[in-house]
Image (cartoon, helix red, strand yellow):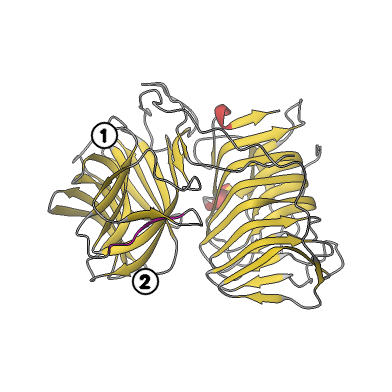
Amino acid sequence: MQQRRLSGRRPLLLAVGAGVTVAALAAGMTSAFAATIFSDDFTDGDTSGWSKSGGTWTVDGSGVLNQSNAGSELARQFAGQTSWTNYSVQARVRPTSFGSSSALVGLAARSSSSTKMYRLALLGSGRAELQAVNGSSVTAIGSASLGVGTGTWYTLRIETSGSTIRGFVNGTQIASGSNSLVGAGRIGLVTAYASGGFDDVLVDSSGGGTPTTPPPTTTPPPTTPPPAGWPTPTASQKVDATIPVSGTFDGGLKRYYGIGDGGQSESQDPMFELAAGATLRNVIIGAPAGDGVHCEGNCTLINVWWEDVGEDAATFRGGTTYTVDGGGARSASDKVFQHNGSGTVYIKNFRVENAGKLYRACGNCSTSYQRHVVIDNVIVRNTDAIAGINTNWGDTARFTRITIVGDPDRETSICVKYKGVPKGSEPTEIGEGADGVNCLYSPSDITYQ
């Protein structure tokens, strides 16, 4: 679907590598923005900055922190400061096994000790439950039956503001209540008689009230310098029909081209169609590329490069969690990533140049979902806007470590707000910029070069 583009594109580089990041918020400082105070996507291959309590924890080759001991009564990893009060913590969580209906894989906030915390748990019974945990005493603040299963990624988020505690799964609030068990504490990743994976941990000051945290005790890791230019294809292959992908497809940096006419026609087939849970990696998509990549469910794109975006680089359709890690896209006359389904798109360690928008949440699809995007460690050049979202549907866009190149007049729009409309109508632009509600970033999250 076509969305109106902004004017004033400018001529990027690549940002790769992300471990633990702690951004400064002075103690007692009040901010109108949701400033990032901690993040970790484990691509550095270790758990530096975390403290372990129980379980068997390892970071795998894809940058996922796994707890593999399903027999452990309580396995936890803690990070952050015990003095953190009002904040939000979010992570992608994937249960891989449950030992019983009460076994859990989840996320914790305000952990004042290893056994006292607020916890958002995915249970073996298929429910998600927001809990106040005090040793063996567990009080349910609220819950929802979600049909939770193993092997699926879920985006969990806990927001704490005074005595108000909220829990979200895939962007939808499943519980909210008042509880005064604990007023401050660290974040945590937890399992109990279960195994699971964790990724893309993000803490920000959007919980409400006055964000309070001491000055950072560590400095952000240096960003790996971008390579000089785009990758050179190892070979080229003309494609006459869409390539279906289930499991993992590794292209070995071969160039694939030949679908469609290279234009903006919405009737073009995709180059790759990814089944739910599929991964596409090390692929260069040349021109013509039709409608790029279609994700029919949750998907992961690793080190995928679009040399000349046709209609869209990728469309996220039927899942709830989609990850783009590494790679880049250029020459997108409209948008790079189109988000038609529900849930959250994660874009990290990416570069975009000569584009209308990097991301657009569909503003006039047949189903009006609430959609979310998390954009981290991205370099932008000659691009009108980084993200467009529909605030009337509760969409959110979060930005950290954004570098904008070649924009001395700062014309690049970070976050453009639209009013989403029914299919057949055109969404209208209603504003732009950080607001602490839908467009979430602070001035320190954006660097101009």
Query: Which x, y percent locates residue 126?
Result: 32, 70
**Badge 1 is on which residue?**
184
Compared across the picture, whether 304 is left or right of 210 comes to right
- Corner quadrant of residue 261: bottom right
Q: Is residue 66 magenta?
A: yes
> Would you say residue 363 is visible in this rendering?
no
What's the residue at 81%, 40% (across, down)?
7
> What amino acid does circle 1 point to?
Ala
Q: Residue at x 54, y 50 (%)?
A: 395
Q: In the rendering, at what x and y percent does residue 226 appear?
A: 68, 40
Residue 167 in sight: yes
* Disc ID at residue 147: 2
Outermost residue toward the left in this view:
136
Callout 2: SS: loop
Q: Nearer the viewer, residue 420 or 239?
A: 239
- Point out the stretch of residues depicted in magenta: 64-69
Does the magenta-highlighted stretch encompass residue 57?
no
Q: Please determine whether, in this image, residue 192 is positioned above or below residue 126.
A: above
33 sits to left or right of 176: right
